[in-house]
Amino acid sequence: MSSRTVIRNGLVITASDEIHADVLIEDGRIVALAATGTPAAESWTAEKTIDATGKYVIPGGVDAHTHMELPFGGTFASDTFETGTRAAAWGGTTTIVDFAVQSVGHSLREGLDAWNAKADGQCAIDYAFHMIVSDVNQETLKEMDLLVEEGVTSFKQFMAYPGVFYSDDGQILRAMQRSAENGGLIMMHAENGIAIDVLVEQALARGETDPRFHGEVRKALLEAEATHRAIKLAQVAGAPLYVVHVSAQEAVAELTRARDEGLNVFGETCPQYLFLSTDNLAEPDFEGSKYVCSTPLRPKEHQAALWRGLRTNDLQVVSTDHCPFCFVGQKELGRGDFSKIPNGLPGVENRMDLLHHAVVDGHISRRRWIEIACATPARMFGLYPKKGTIAPGADADIVIYDPHAEQVMSAETHHMNVDYSAYEGKRVTGQVETVLSRGEPVITEREFTGRAGHGVYTPRSTCQYLL
């Protein structure tokens, strides 16, 4: 039995076009678009019709950087794959790419199997995995080839967190050389963790223990230095590079210079760096701990460089780095020692709305909104055109978006499994109304109608965004 749905009278927005069109969906896929009111569109029949008059019809968001259930600092991120993907759907995101973790002394396969087990049967939306490589050796390098063949085509390394995820320059170079051969994409957490640890030790010795010192020791120059070093190592290896959660104008400058030289170097930023700042880290009574993440929030003057990078395509993607820890019982682990505060912010539900608000504020265009939140992450990580666009053959991952609705972000109304909102009280224009995942309604007129287990694991091809 085939099932057909038609979406009528909306403004369809993709990364390349805006058109008043109707969309025909059959068996979970988009089969046709036709201009509203034309004979072709009028001739369609379907079991279900969705009226999108006055609304946007946009591709479901692709959040290429989430951490559900991530172990960190003696605790775990508070969102499970079930709660986190449900919250993502509420926010108009229909695909996440999460991070499976290789522990030191273990294989990549063990880490991937563990994360597959966490997610299997739990997700409300489709999902895929990157692989965190914590232990580069000859066996790991061989496994990278196998994972690329299986559709895990990106590998994250850390220049930060010595003793946990850290890789030295030699390990990074070896992994980059391997990815140059197998088509994988190295994702880099670019901060000089060795130097940062010295500054942390010195700050604590001076009695500087409050959350705001987290931002002061993780200096923008140490993000820029690591970004520069990662670019040069990638250049030596002849490999592409994707730098995650870029927060500082000096790091953007390094990416811009590399791209001006024609290198396959890409950068991602996150809503927290666009909308929050060190003012939040300095909030009194330990409230600043809610905003501890790495790379850290920067002074407000860095925001202009990030917006400019998004407009000029020196930054290509906005992901969330969603890694929530509750204030009570988790963030509080760092009272009296900022280095013990679990690093991470909730945001998977807020990204599409915050970026639409940036459209309203004139930072970016509507099509650029879809490009940085849907199309480019799908291309970057080998999911396009199955994900990230509205076109015949694509999965029917579609959001009916009300551009005029106003909402106030709050922990009282969000669906993430965390006891605070990083954007508490922020008024934004625009709200998700209905979400389809492969043609199935997950959110129906602001009601959750999805289920755990609807989301399926999605293998990926290699990066589709190379020069």
Image (tube, rainbow, N blue to C red):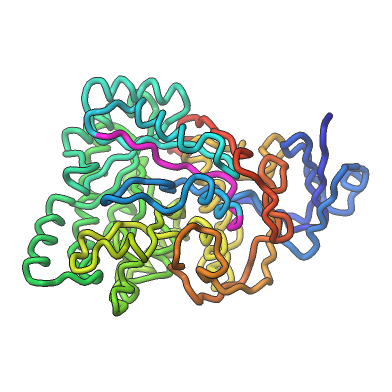
Q: Is residue 58 visible?
A: yes
Determine which quarter of the picture holds residue 135: top left
The span shown in magenta is 90-103
Q: Is residue 290 magenta?
A: no
Q: Pick the residue in front: 188 or 255.
A: 188
Q: Where residue 110 appears, x then y in whole percent?
A: 35, 27
Q: Pick the residue in front: 312 or 150.
A: 150
Q: Where residue 21 appears, x then y in whole percent?
A: 79, 52
Q: Where residue 1 appears, x then y in whole percent?
A: 84, 29
Classify the position of the C terminus by image quarter: top left
Q: Where residue 365 appears, x then y in whole percent?
A: 57, 63
Q: Is residue 314 visible?
A: no
Determine which quarter of the picture holds residue 26: top right
Q: Pick the residue in front: 160 or 239.
A: 160
Determine which quarter of the picture holds residue 418: bottom left
Relative horizontal placement of residue 390, taking residue 231 as reference (left or right): right
Q: Is residue 97 magenta?
A: yes
Q: Residue at x 64, y 51 (%)?
A: 14
